[in-house]
Image (tube, grey):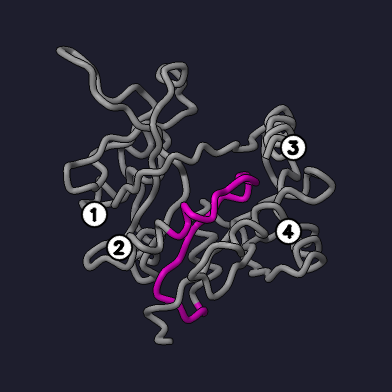
Amino acid sequence: MADADLAVAVIPARWASTRFPGKPLAPLSGRPMVQHVWERVRSARGLARVLVATDDLRIAAAVRGFGGEVAMTGECRTGTDRVWAAVQGIPAGRVLNVQGDEPLIDPECLEALLEALAEPGVQMATLKRPLEPAEEANPNVVKVVSSLSGDALYFSRARLPFERVGPAACFAHVGVYGYRKAFLGQVAAMESTPLERAESLEQLRVLEHGFPIRVVLTSWRGVGVDTPADLLRAERALGAG
């Protein structure tokens, strides 16, 4: 298989977290949380390799302990930078960036991103899902609006769109990304932008620099773990599954 056809997934994992230090190794149903992510990502079809990218020796040791592959990086400004640092020397044409705090990640979502990246002209892709009414005013749930062709028009922490005349479908952004490898390098090198800083949303940097982001619809609702309380929610969800 040619390098351009190979796909790899990277799970960025860092120890430092203001709200939840050591989060990747937090025990979840008897295993470190990052192991749950790794196992689910590995089950996605079409991936040649799955790496956990970290600068922490404790995380690296745990990942190697359950049989995972580690990419050691230096300190990185963002998760995107860490993913780019992990794959620069790896032969691949497509790269998935899967957050290490999504222990219930759906492998089919990852396969959908790989399919989107196989389309001519698509350099970057992400996911959206239907927005629940209770989430409309929650700034921690990012919203996205898309064009008729399926590319992102804008991401915001505010409700989108504003319904002045009639109802419109509203969608939440799901923060899993796919890139053509060469474009990932471009993104990592881009200067920060005003809207990115205003909303604190890194993906706006890509739009402000004039590049499209394909948005793929999914019904999957993640259980992102940002706090110990979220870990309990994930535990219950795993038990229900």
In the image, the segment drawn in magenta is 89-111
| Amino acid carrying mark 4 in the image | Asp
Q: Is residue 212 above or below residue 171?
A: below
Magenta stretch: includes residue 106: yes
Q: Residue at x 35, y 32 (%)?
A: 171
Q: In the image, which disc is placed on residue 136?
A: none
| Dot in front, 2 or 1 | 2
| Amino acid carrying mark 2 in the image | Gln
Mark 4 residue element: loop
Q: Which residue is mark 1?
A: 211
For marks 2 and 1, give the CA distance: 9 Å
| Amino acid carrying mark 3 in the image | Gly
Question: Upstream in the sequence, badge 3 or badge 4?
Answer: 4
Q: In the image, residue 215 lies at what x, y percent?
A: 32, 47
- The secondary structure that most of the magenta stretch takes on is loop
For marks 3 and 2, give the CA distance: 37 Å
For marks 4 and 2, give the CA distance: 30 Å
Q: Which residue is mark 2?
A: 123
Q: Which residue is mark 3?
A: 239
CB of mark 1 within 8 Å of CB of mark 3? no
Figure quadrant of the C terminus:
top right
- Extreme bottom residue here? 1
